[in-house]
Image (spheres, helix red, strand yellow):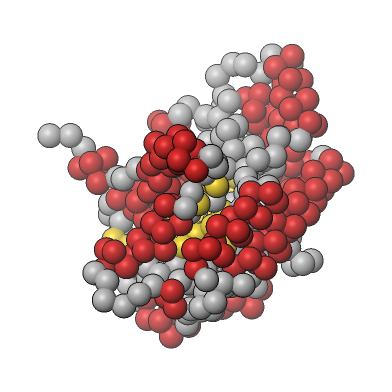
Amino acid sequence: MFSQSLENVRMSPIVTISEEVRKRSKEFKERTGKDFLLFQRGEVDFATPQYIKDAATKGLELGLTKYPKSGGEAFFKEAVVKKLEYYNNVKGLTPDNVIATYGGQEGLELTFKLFEGKKGAGFAPCWSCVLENFVPYCNIDFMEVPLEPDFTVNYEKLEDMMKGISFFYLNNPQNPSGKLFNEEEIVRITGLCEKYGVYLITDESYESIVYDGDKVFSALSLPYKNIISIYTLSKTYSMTGWRIGYLATRNEAIPRLMLLGNYTQTAGVTTFIQFAAAEALNNRTESEKAISEMVNEYKIRRDALYEILKGIPGLKVYMPHAGFYFFPDFSGLIPGGLGEEEQKLYAYQKMMDAGIATVYGACFGHHFNNNVRFSYSATNLSVIKEAGERLKILFN
Ligand SMILES: Cc1ncc(COP(=O)(O)O)c(C=O)c1O
């Protein structure tokens, strides 16, 4: 009786896992005297940098409390154009190429809506919201192109898939693997999109959380016109609750449609939030300082967790180059003879019983069922160390 597309949408399994944790943590504490260790969510534990909070206050004082302009205020879109130029090396855009969105979530939803009812593809593993939310919501026939076990691209498989799809979704840096696609990979993937007339959707939500001197290469810096790039301030500026992001494209037919979608759904993003976000993006000194502080801390956590995971015999661990997730492969630790469902949940359940919350691989598509995602976005070093102790007991 009600909308089929809404009926098909599923709540993110990560939210469901968090609810389960909430239920079990009391019992766990009573039984063991210990806390649940929360490695399941992509929430961040840093406060929003002070200069951004100050800018929000200033925006309120300036009276930026009226109805917003759909698609974004001029000052925000100008700030985005500048940031794309200095940070992403994207040249030649104007504010007309940009739309302000309620976080990366709305940017992706508007973009998937553009391809409603069509065929699309993306690499597996793939962020769960794409699979559980945007794809069913927009009635998309979505194919997964598996990355190799070491998360390299199989170009033969990719090219095969390009024939007959309307768009390709590329999340870089990637959630959940922590892979950072390099320039050569981005150029090849974009080239294939161009060859087959496929739109490229890039999701660069984790763009500045990059380690070891690496940098994200943005496809939008290439001349191919049919690229839509999604950004958000949620992770990079620790602004998850502010709900602000933006998208940009060289294809001038697209912003007009996005603006209509944005007006229909939300009538635009809160104006004083756009004001603060413009300051976040354009105050380079403060921005670089805030981001490097966060990334340094994430790196300390990453290195500590890597040592722990590497020490588990039989576990295959890929060192993330970006983002704040590990996605190790537990195949070598899962006993034979289990049913498919049991196998999928084996490592996750075992850790859950020991008070370690993670996300099982099947949440990220069909190809990495034996992997498990650990997020270190909100786990300080003492939590990571405690996890190390528990994992040693569990898997040695
Ligand atoms: C890959 C990816 N894209 C987009 C988003 C959405 O970000 P936002 O919180 O800004 O909606 C997330 C959030 O977890 C994400 O992991």
Q: Is residue 285 left or right of residue 342?
A: right
Residue placed furthest toward the right: 285
Q: Which image quarter: residue 87?
A: bottom right
Q: Is residue 125 left or right of residue 76?
A: left
Q: Is residue 93 left or right of residue 189?
A: right
Residue in the picture at 56% in, 65% down = 392
Residue in the picture at 40% in, 31% down = 264
Residue in the picture at 64% in, 49% down = 383
Q: Which image quarter: residue 131?
A: bottom left
Give the vertical position of 156 relative to 186 (above or below): below
Q: Which image quarter: residue 156?
A: bottom left
Residue placed furthest toward the bottom: 156
The quadrant the N terminus occupies is: top left
Give the vertical position of 131 relative to 340 (above or below): above
Q: Is residue 338 left or right of residue 224?
A: left
Residue 393 is at least partly visible in this image:
yes
Residue 347 horizontal/vertical position (percent): 42, 63
**Camera-side residue: 51 or 224?**
51
Residue 252 is at least partly visible in this image:
no
Residue 272 horizontal/vertical position (percent): 66, 24
**Camera-side residue: 55 or 192?**
55
Give the vertical position of 338 relative to 107 (above or below): below
